[in-house]
Image (tube, grey):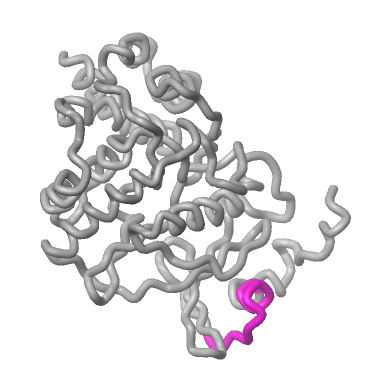
Amino acid sequence: MSPHADAHPTADSPDDSPGAATARLTGRSVTGTRPLPGALTEVTLDDGRTAVAKRGAGAGSHGSGAHADAVRAEAAGLRWLAGAAAVRVPRVLGEDRRWLVTERVPDGAPTPGTAARFGADLARLHAAGAAAFGAPPPGGPEAACIGLAPMRNVPGDDWPRWYAEHRVLPYLRRAVDDGSVRPAEASVIERVCEELPRLAGPAEPPARLHGDLWNGNVLWDTGGNAWLIDPAAHGGHRETDLAMLRLFGCPHLDRVLDGYEDTSPLAEGWRDRVGLHQLFPLLVHTVLFGRGYAGQALAAARSALGA
């Protein structure tokens, strides 16, 4: 145990409220708080700034395992993405084992033009690169999270092998053990993993991924500019971010893709590989939410195989 473990309030302490945590981590007085969707809290500081306080996944009176590092992983991911100077990312104002405090993004909406600019900026973010496939952000832990699911950032130099071993198969095994995926269905997904060297397309260098790029993690400010929140950042294949963006929908997605390809064209056949890259998030959702997503995962596997 850290010698400073008792320096932080416990989860049951009245001093562990979002406002108290924000004041402690920013060194500013808090003048108001307001609940936001997703168990977030908007916090107004005495200097007029507005922040968002978020309790880390699984944070309680005893942080342990992957969830104990959830805040550190997210904060490191935000800083790493911001370091690319590409897509806007909320500034980290403070964090500890339980709380992450970031600047608040003013609510707005995209336009076709700003959606295309987001695509171009996303291409530049990916091009900023990573040390390896699976490499965590500098200062980030190996044991991280994607949503509420544990995720390990284990570096590798061969994307097909890494993607199978560290992104597809761990969640497939868990889903089979839970009964969410049937053995016959699992065999189809396992076949995708076996054939990944053939299915993966041309080799690409590790990209700097957001890692959980569904529509809810893209905010649009009052000027229509895109901001990225809640990353599961790591080094990966750039088509994975784009496939996840397509999976759950995104305003003006065609314009986003146009802006991306104008800046950094995708390899031939990328549309045929969308299902391959969607396997990971669909299996994560199967683990978290049950059999309702298993059919989509199976369909994605069959699409990847051309079946």
151 shown above or below 193: below
Res 23 quadrant in image = bottom right
Residue 222 pos. (x, y %) = 26, 76
Taking the spot 15% from the left edge, 27% from the top edge, the residue there is 268
Task: Judge by depth and name the residue closer to the eye, 237 or 277.
Answer: 237
Task: Judge by depth and name the residue closer to the eye, 286 or 204.
Answer: 204
Taking the spot 36% from the left edge, 35% from the top edge, the residue there is 281
Res 283 quadrant in image = top left
Residue 197 pos. (x, y %) = 32, 13
- The C terminus sits in image quarter: top left
Q: How many marks?
A: 0
- Residue 293 visible in the picture: yes
Res 159 quadrant in image = top left
Taking the spot 50% from the left edge, 20% from the top edge, the residue there is 177
- Numbered range of the magenta stretch: 21-32
- Residue 179 visible in the picture: no
Check residue 30 for magenta coloring. yes
79 shown above or below 207: below
User: Is 168 positioned to the left or the right of 135 in the image?
Assistant: left
Residue 252 pos. (x, y %) = 13, 55
User: Is 210 positioned to the left or the right of 264 in the image?
Assistant: right
Task: Judge by depth and name the residue closer to the eye, 20 or 93.
Answer: 93
Taking the spot 16% from the left edge, 15% from the top edge, the residue there is 306
User: Is 173 positioned to the left or the right of 10 in the image?
Assistant: left
User: Is 267 positioned to the left or the right of 227 in the image?
Assistant: left
130 shown above or below 83: above
Residue 72 pos. (x, y %) = 61, 52
Task: Judge by depth and name the residue closer to the eye, 152 or 301.
Answer: 152
Check residue 8 for magenta coloring. no
